[in-house]
Amino acid sequence: MLRFVARRFLETIPVLFIIATITFFMMRLAPGGPFDAEKQASKEVRARMEAHYGLDKPIFVQYLLQMKHLLQGDLGPSYKYPSRTVNEIITDAFPVSLELGGESLAVALVLGLLAGMIASLKQNTFWDHFPMSLAMIGLCVPTFVMGPLLISAFALHLDWFNAAGWYFPRDRVLPALTLGAFYAAYVARLARGGLLEVLRQDFIRTAQAKGAGGARILFKHALRGGLLPVVSFLGPAIAGLLTGSFVVETIFGIPGLGRYFVTAAFNRDYFMIMGSVLFYAVFVIAMNLVVDIVLVWLNPKLRFE
Amino acid sequence: MMIRNTSLAATILALGFFLVCGCGPRETMVEIADRAGQYRVGNGGEPGDLDPQVAIGQLEHDIMLSLFEGLVYGDAKDVSPRPGVAESWDISPDGLVYTFHLRQNARWSNGEPVTARDFCETYHRMLMPSLAAQYSYMLYPVTNAEAFNTGQITNFDQVGFKVVDDHTLRVALHSPTPYLLSMMVHDSWYPLPMATIKKFGAIDDRSNPWTRPEHFVGNGPFVLKEWRMNSHILVVKSPTYWDAEHVRLNSIYFLPEENYDTEERMFRSGQLHTVRSAPQSKVAFYREYKPNLINIYPLLTTYFYKLNVTRPPLNDKRVREALAMALDRHAITETVTRAGEIPAFCLTPPGTAGFTARAALREDPAEARRLLAAAGYPDGKNFPAVTLLYNTLQSHKAIAEAVQEMWRKNLNLHVTLQNEEWKVYLDAMRTTNYDICRSGWGADYADPSTFLDVFLTDSGNNGTGWSNAEYDRLCRAAASTGDQAARYAAYQKAEAILADEMPIIPIYIYSNPRLLQPSVKGWYPNLLDNPNYRSIYLVPQTH
């Protein structure tokens, strides 16, 4: 296993290098720059600001300089927020996204697994059709519709929650539901499918013949194999929950990293773009590695290779 | 069966969780804040910085206004200059020397006195070329300020700021500038705590972290207490402020929400006292059903289209005039924008510091057709392909579509619409790479010069390729005379040249639909939309 992890780690280096290079040149190709504003600075002021940040140097020199700083772990300054560094902004904002992602994942797993298990055990009854129809709705309704709908119902009409913000524990509920709903639906369908397949297999029939009860069969025998599709989905799901939270963070006014990921591009905040792209890249790669390890652990047919 | 019981228990648990979280006190944040004297403001976005010499936008301005005070400050109702740190001033008969007498009791939030030296050092920093302060030009009326800022001279003693004693500052101008005090209301004239700035880095370093709450020192009615990015900024009443006894709010809580719809929902759920601008789609609803919550008032901001005069067919004055004359501005403000905007027929909003342009363009489709025919395009025939560019936003799109239709109907012209992302649009405008593009200009201070100077040949914001020597001469002449009548006469002529040459098509004067809770008192609309934290107070509402 150690060799497996070490090899994956080594593979990561060229991947990150390529991502950094592509990001650098793509953002420079986009028209407009960090200092374009509604009220444009004079030519002199603009030139001096560019000089201050080294944007007056030839593009290839800038590229090498940035690569050098990246190797040192220095993500650079933010143009949009002059007194902050990108490292600082990410350190500040990522825990918020992480928390939102974690809570949404909990929503997704609790609701999704529950619905999936019930549906698989009660196949083709009301307890199958009802949660699966809900799941279908969850899959179809995009977050930018789900969010305002939930706010309208639970914040503005019932007055149970604040309409937006990230100040009190209760402020977590609606965003986590909004973001988690889609994944809950997906997990429910995957869990149902996976479990149904396992429940039809011979070893389950053997267990039944031996007199094992429903709970014992589900938790002791079926779950481990039945949840494999869910686990393989978790890698991309976690990445999605964390990177895809931009919409939810915007609707609910949450100070997470997802917003910077997108607004940095709008602001042409070059270092911020590079920093958040690389940060997410590392995160996604790490998550996929963890999922691969868990998969091998769950499924004896797989090996680290 | 056991499964059923487990899942049932889990379901009940989950439901219970939501009910416990959900059922809380019915009191809203605003009601709690009313009692605590905390004004909760939807600030429209995260400020780039709170250093008045580095930050440039309106939303930064709105926060800095609570943290600093200049020699003068803007009156709550008409933004006219009132004594701030300077309790009085003398102006020499020729209008060239201003002597400011500073209050003995003006203090920084760390208790140190605010002195004339502080102002002088602050302005030195503002003008340092290495700081690259975008608003340094606001200090250009001062003798040699421009020369120092552009590096022609390096000795700051030659610049017209002089410390007479701790509480007397003398400012010498190169030419009389009757609107100098109005300019001084702007952020660029605030004093800064130079000793504090030096403590945290080079004074000309844009990235100096002195504005962090743990470092911050200011001289305004409030002082920075907390700043968490994209979450909130909390400022609390400053005990050292000279006029603290008249400040009635205990604190202000700025929520930097940049999404208009989210902000409006926060207002509706009682999380905010005020929102700068209601989303356009909600204005009609508030006007109709909640008129006590919305305040619509005009701003010194003009919405117009820029025409690229370097490209045919727009290099022909008659074509530009035809396009401008063929619009029905009342139809646009009454059926498209619908938030109380005022149709504009010249660049400077009427009544800007008492100036109303006499030269105004006419709306006359018949004359427009004649001009277009004279330019060689009778009934729009052979008119080259022209594109109207705007930044991606629903409201700009609606206006552009209305304009497109008016040109089609009145002139038989087919203009293509094109929307671009903000920075792409700005880049196109800066490099004059467009045919027609949507634009707007808001006043930095209350004087026609803030509008008319935009179309000087060397202005960084002109962007139309238009240049007129006589126009430049008139604006410069107006800037160098202390005779208000002569200045406005020159500006009248400048407006007449604009109306005749038509490098821009004015469309309307902005109005701002601000949302305000009924508990907010002492708030007044003003043309610069300066929030007046000094006069605002909160009265808890009884149900």
Image: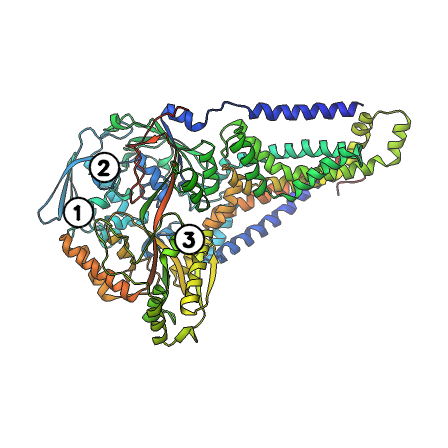
Residue depicted at 66% across the width and 42% down the height: A139
Disc 2 crowd, CA 10 A, few/some/many (<14, 14-19, 20+): some
A130 horizontally vs A222: left or right: left
The residue tagged with tag 3: helix, strand or loop?
helix
Q: Nearer the viewer, mark 2 or mark 3?
A: 3
- For the residues labelled 2 and 3, say whether their Cβ atoms are less than 8 Å apart: no
Q: Position of residue A45 (x, y in %)?
A: 33, 53
| Three-letter amino acid code at the position of disc 1 | Gly
Q: Is residue B523 visible?
A: yes
Nearest to N terminus: mark 1 or mark 3: 1
Pointer 3 residue: B335
Q: Quadrant of the N terminus of chain B?
A: top right
Q: Nearer the viewer, mark 1 or mark 3?
A: 3
Pointer 1 residue: B160
Residue depicted at 78% across the width and 28% down the height: A219
Q: Is residue A279 above or below residue B371?
A: above
How much space separates mark 1 and mark 3, taking CA atoms? Answer: 52 Å
Pointer 2 residue: B118
